[in-house]
Image (cartoon, rainbow, N blue to C red):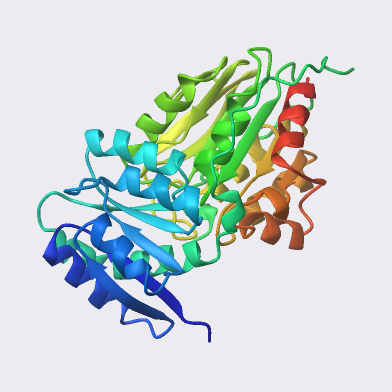
Amino acid sequence: MAIINVLVVDDSAVVRQVISNELSKDKSINVIAAVADPIFAMKRMGMQWPDVIVLDVEMPRMDGITFLKKIMAERPTPVVICSTLTIKGAETTMQALDAGAVTIITKPKVGVKNFLEESSNELIHAVKTAACANTKNLIPRKTPTTPTLKPTAKLTADAVLTQATVAMTQTTDKVIAIGTSCGGTQALEFVLSALPKTCQGIVIVQHMPEKFTAAFAARVNSISEIDVREAQNGDRVIPGQALIAPGGKHLLLTRSGAQYRVEVRDGPLVNRHRPSVDVLFRSVAKCAGKNAVGIIMTGMGDDGAHGMAEMHDQGAYTIAQNQETCVVFGMPKEAIKLGGVDKIMSLQDIVREIINIH
C-alpha cells in the first residue's frame, strides 16, 4: 500500500491538530508536519516534499493563494483547500481553484473541531483523490480563444428521480449536459470561456460545496461570451447559457411541451454527492433522449457513469474527456468501462464539438 505524505498548513492550532489526527486514522496517510503558515511550510518542504498539501487560505505572513501559485510555478503538487464556508471565503477560494488547487474542504467559522471530526471521511477522501491527480494538468491553462469553426450541417439517482417524463422524438433545441468533479473548475472555465453565444443550452453539475457555486459561476461568466450562472428552480434551458447546479442541491432537467427547464431539488446524497452527476444525466436521458449531448470530464469516482450509459441507451451523443487532459481520470474512465461513451476527446476537441452541435 502506497503511503501518502501530507503537509497541513493552517494558522489555527486546533485545526492543525484535528486534521492531523483525523488523517492519521487512515493507515495509507502519513502527516509529515502541520505548520502555522507558508513560511514554515517552505522550510519543512525543503527537508521532505509532500505528496499532498492541505492548505488554509487566510494566514499571516503569506496568504494561501500566493503560496499556492509559488508551489505551482516551482513544483506542481496536489493541494486540498480547507476554507471557511462563507460567501467572502468562496470568492477567495475560487482564486485558489483557478491557481491549480484540486478540491475544497469547507469549515465553519465556529465549531470547527466537531465539524472536522464529523467530516473525517470526506477529508480522507479528498486527500486520496488529490494524491491521484495528474500534476501536469494542475497548472492553470491559458483561456482559449473561440475556435474559428463554422457550425456544420450508492444510493442511486432513483432516490431523487421520481418524474416519469418521456423524451420527445425530436426538438429544435439540443441540451448539453456536463458532469465533472476534481479538476473540473479549470476544465469548465477552459470550455465555457471559449464558447460563442450561438451554442446550445448547457446544464452542469460540478461537485462543489454550498455557497461556492455562485462565486464560481460569476467568475466564469465574467470571462465568457455565454451567460454562465448558478441555476435557479424553473430556469429555462436556452442557447447561449450555462446553468450550474447549486452546491448542496440536485439539478434535474424537466420538459414542458418543447421547452426544457431545470428543477433544483433537495434530496439524499447520491454516489456520496449532492449535486450528483448521475441525477442530472438520468433526468436528461428521460426528458431529452436523443436530443441531448452528455459530456463527462475530470473527476474521482464513478458519479455520472451510469447516468451517461442511460443517456447513451436513449440515443444521446456522449463524450468523455481523455486521460491526457484530465486532472483525475476517474469519472470518464468508469463511463468508458460501462460502454456509455461514443467518443473520447481532449478539452480542446470538446470545445470544438460543442460549437458544432446544432
Residue 233 shown left or right of residue 325 in the figure: left
Answer whether residue 163 is visible to the viewer in this image.
Answer: no
Q: Nearer the viewer, residue 229 or 8?
A: 8
Residue 194 falls in which quadrant of the image? Answer: top right
Residue 169 shown left or right of residue 303 in the figure: right
Q: Nearer the viewer, residue 255 or 233?
A: 233
Q: Residue at x 32, y 61 (%)?
A: 42
Q: Nearer the viewer, residue 209 or 70?
A: 70
**Residue placed furthest toward the right:** 153
> Residue 95: where, in percent of width, then height?
38, 37
Q: In which quadrant of the rendered image does the C terminus lie?
A: top right
Q: Residue at x 30, y 48 (%)?
A: 64
Q: Residue at x 30, y 37 (%)?
A: 92
Answer whether residue 177 is visible to the viewer in this image.
Answer: yes
Q: Nearer the viewer, residue 309 or 180?
A: 180
Residue 343 shown left or right of residue 288 in the figure: right
> Residue 333: where, in percent of width, then height?
70, 59
Residue 44 shown left or right of residue 301 in the figure: left
Q: Residue at x 22, y 64 (%)?
A: 116
Where is 141 relative to 327, above or below?
above
Where is 236 relative to 126, above or below?
above
> Residue 29: where, in percent of width, then height?
40, 79
> Residue 308: where, in percent of width, then height?
68, 49
